[in-house]
Image (tube, rainbow, N blue to C red):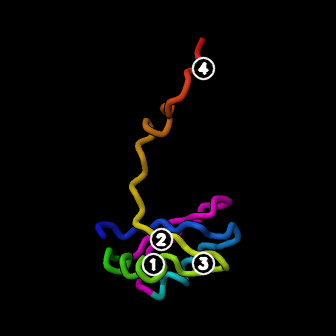
Amino acid sequence: MQGSRLYVGNLRYTVTNEQLQQLFAEYGQVKSVNVIEGKGFGFVEMSTPEEAQKAKDALDGKEFNDRNLKVDEAKPPRDRQDRDRPRGGPSRRS
């Protein structure tokens, strides 16, 4: 694993930053946690890539609050220009 930032998916909407921090702290030092409210996913940054890999290996697929977690290395954010451009389909211009 190259980075130390993890994507955590399939969360209940009620999961808090503190709950996720406690879960991941078992596998190393947690630098930051950001649960995206109302979306069912979040991000956890560990202090080293090795700790991130250890957490990923242990928690991917593990049941947490009656859901199986999806844990993977976080991808870098897309450039804003890429997010704002149309994604295909018919043009709506006349």
Q: CA distance from mark 3 to mark 2?
A: 17 Å
* Dot label at residue 8: none
Q: Which residue is mark 2?
A: 71
Q: Which type of secondary structure does the marked residue at label 2 adopt?
A: strand
Compare marks 1 and 3 and give the one earlier in the sequence.
Answer: 3
Q: CA distance from mark 3 to mark 4?
A: 45 Å
- Residue 37, by quadrant, is bottom right
Compare marks 3 and 2 and give the one earlier in the sequence.
Answer: 3
Quadrant location, the C terminus: top right
Amino acid type of the residue tagged 4 in the rendering: Arg
Q: Which type of secondary structure does the marked residue at label 3 adopt?
A: helix
Q: Are marks 4 and 1 in contact (CB under 8 Å)?
A: no
Q: Which residue is mark 3?
A: 18
The magenta segment: 27-47
On screen, residue 77 above or below 64: above
Tell me the crowding category of disc 2: few under 14, some 14 to 19, or many 20 or more residues within 10 angstroms, Cα based. Answer: many
Residue sitting farthest toward the right: 14
Q: Which residue is mark 1?
A: 30
Q: Which residue is mark 4?
A: 92
Of tags 4 and 1, which is closer to the observer? Answer: 4
Q: CA distance from mark 4 to mark 2?
A: 38 Å
Of tags 3 and 4, which is closer to the observer? Answer: 4
Q: CA distance from mark 4 to mark 1?
A: 46 Å
Quadrant location, the N terminus: bottom left
**x 64%, y 59%: residue:** 39
Amino acid type of the residue tagged 3 in the rendering: Glu
Compare marks 2 and 1 and give the one earlier in the sequence.
Answer: 1
**x 63%, y 75%: residue:** 67
**x 41%, y 75%: residue:** 46
**x 70%, y 71%: residue:** 14
